[in-house]
Image (cartoon, rainbow, N blue to C red):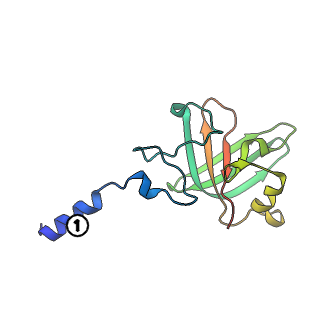
Amino acid sequence: MPAALLAASLFLLLPIGDEALAGAGAPAFEAGGGRLRPPEYVTCDRNRLTSFTGRVVALDRGRDRTTLRMETDEATRESLTIRHPGGDARASFRMAGEPFAEADWAAILPAGRLRAGIRATAWVCADEANPKIDWERPQ
């Protein structure tokens, strides 16, 4: 293999540090792991926790449950259900890390329809009944 090609190949295989991945509005990564650092409101043991980040492609708000489907950044499809007998899903939602307000529904469902391209991170704990959904604020 020519030396220039070998050098280029080695350069492409070098890992990028977490600090290079961070930016304004970017998710926080745990040191050296490439794994999302859970926000403070996610109190689940990290060994029992997983997260999915991606585009929400469907949202169905029912009286006792809210279901959403995501196409993740890892090219998987996930379906998540939040059960809320007699209430609503706001207790399990955040907007850009902040508590979800009634007015935030308009950002997600303008004119009653799911906003195209809306994104979220779902935090799913094996020990908890409902995932926590952190919506990205639309631009």
In the visual, does 52 lie left or right of 92?
A: left
Q: Position of residue 118 (x, y in %)?
A: 67, 62
Kindly identify the residue that appears in the image at 58 percent across and 58 percent down.
25
Height in image: 99 above or below 42?
below
In the visual, does 109 lie left or right of 96?
A: right
Could you tell me which quadrant the N terminus lies in? bottom left
Task: In this rendered view, identify the residue nearer to me: 47 or 15.
Answer: 15
Q: Position of residue 13 (x, y in %)?
A: 28, 57
Q: Quadrant of residue 31?
A: top left
Task: In this rendered view, identify the residue nearer to me: 13 or 60.
Answer: 13
Kindly identify the residue that appears in the image at 85 percent across and 44 percent down.
63
Q: Position of residue 49 (x, y in %)?
A: 56, 36
For the image, the number of numbered tags is 1
Single out the residue that lies furthest toward the right: 86
Q: Position of residue 102 (x, y in %)?
A: 84, 52
Could you tell me which quadrant the C terminus lies in? bottom right
Give the labeled residue for mark 1.
8
Task: In this rendered view, identify the residue nearer to me: 60 or 101.
Answer: 101
Q: Which amino acid type corresponds to the residue marked 1 in the rendered image? A: Ala
In the visual, does 7 lie left or right of 28?
A: left
Q: Secondary structure at mark 1?
A: helix
Give the class, few, some or many, for how many residues have Cα within 10 Å of label 1's Cα (few <14, many ≥20): few
Task: In this rendered view, identify the residue nearer to me: 23 or 61.
Answer: 23
Kindly identify the residue that appears in the image at 83 percent across and 44 percent down.
88
Single out the residue that lies furthest toward the left: 2
Kindly identify the residue that appears in the image at 62 percent across and 47 percent down.
122
